[in-house]
Amino acid sequence: MTAKIPVVENILSANDALAGQIQAQLDQAAVLALNVMASPGGGKTSVILRTVRALMDEVRIGVMDGDIVEIDLRELAALGLPVSLINTGGQCHLDANMVLRALPSMNLGALDLLIIENVGNLICPAAFKLGVHFNIVIASVPEGADKPYKYPSMFRGADVLLLNKMDLQEYMDFDVDYFRQGVEALNPGVAFFPVSCRTGEGLDAWFAWLRAQLNSRSAAG
Amino acid sequence: MPRTVHELGVTQSILQIALRHAERAGAARIREVSLVIGELSSIVDDSVQFYWDLISEGTIAHGAVLSFTRVPAMLRCQDCAHEFPLNQHDYACPACASSKVIVADGEQFFLESIDVDLAEPQPGL
């Protein structure tokens, strides 16, 4: 006898359950966590370095990096920050299982802000919740203004969008209005910061946004 | 080959969910697994069936056929309510040219149902 059994379960339900465990650990330790996503070369490490240097005298920051080598972490470790490599073994994205297993390497009780650098990829990381408070997506001018149209899921899932390498705009014919129109359709009202990690342009607005999130959490706690 | 690793992980998730529901129903064999995949969700291609055939070996799911219902991404104009498929060049409404549009469909990513052979009642039980 055959039968059709209704299931209707999210394919990533196991990942989402683990993401819930991560969020519970973070919230218990009152740590604000960010999942930083971008293409390879979009500026994840540059944004993180800039952010760490701007805020490290105010809050205690740790960085976890999803990669196969430690290169990106050396500069951060040299600043005296707790850092941890989440070895992805060549995976195209971080998932909640990898982060949860690596979490004990960070002393959450000694942190206010945890920055998780995802694998450089504009497609796969968008689907996997990590239990963080904000998804930070970095696009960059040389990649072209059509990225929200080619990789809609990534822009749909962003809580904050940084458009990096604004110092190159005049050389690239980057149409900011076209870019923003695509983003607004997918993700109305997303926090948007045009920045340049090379010149520092626009970064203060991003730091102010992040400070406001940290303050509202510490006030609530 | 990062993308293939991605599909393998997704296939493992699908297999776990299918086996859990099949066991709960007392199924002897899974014949078909129906998936609903929106265009805006995670990418899943036909390699899932290839991985399925490998990793389901030795389980009651071996030999099952995966069927995909693909749901296109749709946008809806907030000015004239026109619905239109998302394309990769322009999100403005083709009916009234408004750029005030929102996503209306295409985010599904779930296992809808499984077709199974139910176990025959064992004599003497």
Image: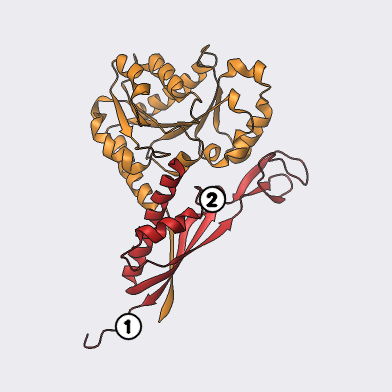
Horizontal placement of A176 versus A1: left or right? Answer: right
Residue B120 numbered tag: 1
Chain that is orange in the image: A
Horizontal placement of B95 versus A117: left or right? Answer: right
Badge 1 density bin: few <14, some 14–19, many ≥20, Cα 10 Å: few
Quarter placement of the C terminus of chain A: top left
The kind of residue tagged 2 is: Glu
Please identify the quarter of the rendering in which residue A89 is found: top left
* Place of residue A98 in the rendered image (x, y in percent of width and height, measured from the top left): 32, 40
Nearer the observer, B46 or A8: B46
Horizontal placement of A71 versus A191: left or right? Answer: left
The kind of residue tagged 1 is: Glu
Please identify the quarter of the rendering in which residue A7 is found: bottom left
* Residue highlighted by disc 2: B107
Question: Which residue is rendered at x = 39% and y = 24% of the image?
Answer: A215
- From this view, report whether residue B23 is shown above or below residue B2: below
Q: CA distance from mark 2 to mark 1?
A: 39 Å
Secondary structure, mark 2, is loop
Mark nearest the camera among 2 and 1 is: 1
Chain of the residue displaying label 2: B
* Place of residue B84 in the rendered image (x, y in percent of width and height, measured from the top left): 69, 50
